Amino acid sequence: MTQYRPAITRTTSAIETMLQHHSVRAFTNEPVPEDALQAILVSALSAATSSNQNSWSVVTVRDPERKKRLMESTGSNPFIAQAPVFFVWVADLSRAHRLAEAQGVDPVVLHYQEALLIATVDAALAAQNAVVAAESLGLGTCYVGGIRTQIDTVSELLNLPEYSYPVLGLSVGCPSPDDSAGVKPRLPLSAVAFDEQYDATAADAGIPVLERETSEYFASQGVAHHSWSEKSLIRWSSMRALRGRENNRGVIAARGLLDE
Ligand SMILES: Cc1cc2nc3c(=O)[nH]c(=O)nc-3n(C[C@H](O)[C@H](O)[C@H](O)COP(=O)(O)O)c2cc1C
């Protein structure tokens, strides 16, 4: 019996889709139908966008060779080659720069961290709309943050312009019968959602609940598992976990973003 997720008494099909979310890392080779792909992309297009700036783009990759090269650039995500579709969500200020240049305007604001954040958040919101749309169509998805391990290589493979960078990858396809992953626990709602003011005691009190439920989850999957804290602390204290992404400030600045 899960303790982290309180029962809800009101629901919709959209809510049910979100409550069933789990990342899928094993796919059949069935293609994603064109109309499904279109529905996913149009759903992404409908996400809110900061100040109505539309500061994102997405590249759909289906070519096996390009998917393979993207997979190699991310490290250890073999499912990228297996899934029929790999989306790369891009923080994209290049359109804004081109428009400003054509109009003879100096877009000074676009060089600051705030513009980078706006574009990054926009790309993530669009991606999450795509996830919900894909899952509602019975497809499986898995994000790939590893796309930021070799930003320059990915940008070259996808012909991304200056003033843009790849924020997230997303594999999409039909879940393989081998995909046995279930709904993974989260921190309890009481540890992340507060009334009126933040409560650090409640925030931290959720950790033992997550520890216990995560251990139970992995035991049910037959997977050996270190405690959630132990695993997280290793990740937070080992530079190896960054896989070179510690240099991304400079890499992104060299692409014309965050250079103020
Ligand atoms: C921004 C982001 C980046 C992620 N990057 C990867 C990745 O590179 N490889 C991977 O296998 N999973 C990746 N994931 C999936 C997470 O590991 C997964 O969401 C998390 O373990 C929770 O599991 P669930 O999605 O099944 O609930 C990523 C998820 C997010 C939100």
Image (cartoon, rainbow, N blue to C red):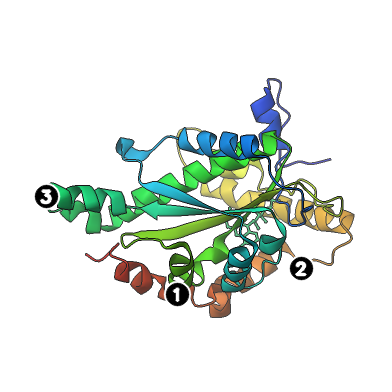
Graded by Cα atoms within 10 Å as few (under 14), some (14 to 19) or many (20 or more), the crowding at tag 3 reads few
Q: Which mark is residue 122?
A: none
Q: Disc 2 vs disc 1: which is toward the camera?
A: 1
Residue at the spot of label 2: 226
Q: Secondary structure at mark 1?
A: helix
Q: Which mark is residue 246?
A: 1
Residue 49 % position (x, y): 38, 38
C-alpha distance separating marks 3 and 1: 33 Å
Residue at the spot of label 3: 105
Closer to the camera in the image, 213 or 137: 137
Q: Quadrant of the C terminus?
A: bottom left
Q: Are marks 2 and 1 in contact (CB under 8 Å)?
A: no
Q: Secondary structure at mark 3?
A: loop
Q: For residue 20, which quarter of the picture?
A: top right
Residue at image position (79%, 41%) is 2
* Kind of residue indicated by mark 2: His
Compared with residue 159, is residue 109 higher up or lower down, i.e. above or below?
above
Residue 191 % position (x, y): 60, 45
Q: Secondary structure at mark 2?
A: loop
Residue 42 % position (x, y): 51, 34
Graded by Cα atoms within 10 Å as few (under 14), some (14 to 19) or many (20 or more), the crowding at tag 2 reads few
Q: Quadrant of the N terminus?
A: top right
Q: Quadrant of ligand 1?
A: bottom right
Q: For residue 171, which quarter of the picture?
A: bottom right
* Kind of residue indicated by mark 3: Val
Closer to the camera in the image, 244 or 220: 244
C-alpha distance separating marks 2 and 1: 25 Å
* Kind of residue indicated by mark 1: Glu
Closer to the camera in the image, 10 or 14: 14
Whichever of callouts 2 and 1 sits on the residue coming sooner in the sequence is 2
